[in-house]
Image (cartoon, helix red, strand yellow):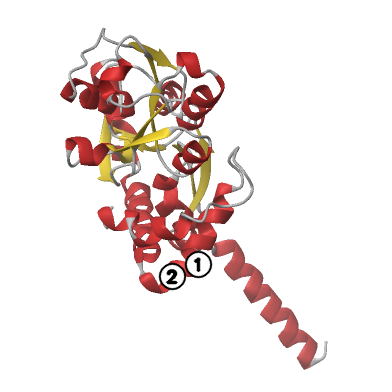
Amino acid sequence: MRPTIMIGALACAAMLGMMSAAPAQTALKVIVFPGLSNFSIYAAQHKNLFAKHGLAIELIYTPNSTVLREGLAKGDYQIAQAGVDNSVAMVELAKADAIIVAGGDNGFNHIFVQPEVNAYADLRGKTVVVDAPNTAFALLLYKVLKDNGLNKGDYVVKPVGATIARLEAMTKDKANATAGVLNPPFTFLARDAGLKDMGATAKAIGAYQSDGVVVMRDWAKANSDALVRYISALIEGRRWALDPANKEQAVALLAERRKPMPLRPTPPKAWPRMHSSTWRVSGTC
């Protein structure tokens, strides 16, 4: 064998050896609700930060809180990133040992109502739509209504599912969906549909911890290294998303990641404002 051929063969063998020795990525299923609160995840995927930390992420959209909570408890998903009240509900109602391991943001939630509603008092005897009646944004809505003189029983609560389902109910079944909590990008569609924005829930009740990272305690104990790597990638993604130098890329990323959702193909003009203002409300994970 000629020397050049032998050298080439040895080089190929060495490369194959290095490839086979490369550590396998840890696969994680992460369940979330569609929406802007996933921006850190989108950014981490876009910049290959999960791969950098040795993780392969499968991102799954949940239709409602029940699927998310039950799936996490059964081990169908390793991580849930959603309203932290879901973890509280899992512990208090289902006696599932779920824990919150990282925070997120305030959800960017707004309360929307039908156009004829002029004040919260007008919701007396009306139907409000929620995801599940005992967690997260439903509790937030009850609090705002209570602060405005409406107690449970003064209105009808109708569980319909995630934000997109609440928006659909409010635009297609108006008589049975007078009010609901919505968040971006669905807030843009709600305004376009003629629904009335009563304002940000955080402005109505003050600081509010919306989403966070939730896992089962036993899984966290057995997979602490993978969990730390996940949170590290998430924080790096948030920092990239918040860096003003990345604004154009970040807005383009939001528009692109919005396409798989059941929404209009053209991103609203408000996306750039979401990067420059809303996300500064909570700059850490």
**Label 2 SS:** helix
Q: Percent from the top left, x then y, of residue 258?
A: 55, 48
Residue appearing at x 26%, y 54% in the figure: 281
Give the Cα distance between marks 1 and 2: 5 Å
27 vs 276, left or right, is right
Residue appearing at x 60%, y 66% in the figure: 19
Give the quarter of the image for residue 40.
Answer: bottom left
The amino acid beneath tag 2 is Asn
Q: In the figure, 25 relative to 80: above or below?
A: below
Look at mark 2 in the image and give the residue it sits on.
246
Q: Percent from the top left, x then y, of residue 82?
A: 37, 36
Residue ranking furthest to the bottom: 3
The amino acid beneath tag 1 is Gln
Residue ranking furthest to the right: 1
Q: Percent from the top left, x then y, of residue 275?
A: 40, 59
Residue appearing at x 48%, y 53% in the figure: 42
Q: Percent from the top left, x then y, of residue 6?
A: 75, 85
Residue 22: mark: none
Q: In the figure, 78 relative to 50: above or below?
A: above
Give the quarter of the image for residue 7.
Answer: bottom right
140 vs 244, left or right, is left
Q: In the figure, 158 relative to 208: above or below?
A: above
Q: Crowdedness of circle 1 by 10 Å Cα count: few (<14), some, many (20+)? A: some
Question: How many numbered badges does the structure rendering display?
Answer: 2
Residue 15 visible: yes
Q: Decide which of 169, 51 is in the foreground and name it.
A: 169
Residue appearing at x 62%, y 51% in the figure: 266
Mark 1 in CB contact with mark 2 (< 8 angstroms): yes
Question: Dividing the image into 4 quarters, which one contains the N terminus?
Answer: bottom right
Q: Crowdedness of circle 2 by 10 Å Cα count: few (<14), some, many (20+)? A: few
**Label 1 SS:** helix
Look at mark 1 in the image and give the residue it sits on.
249
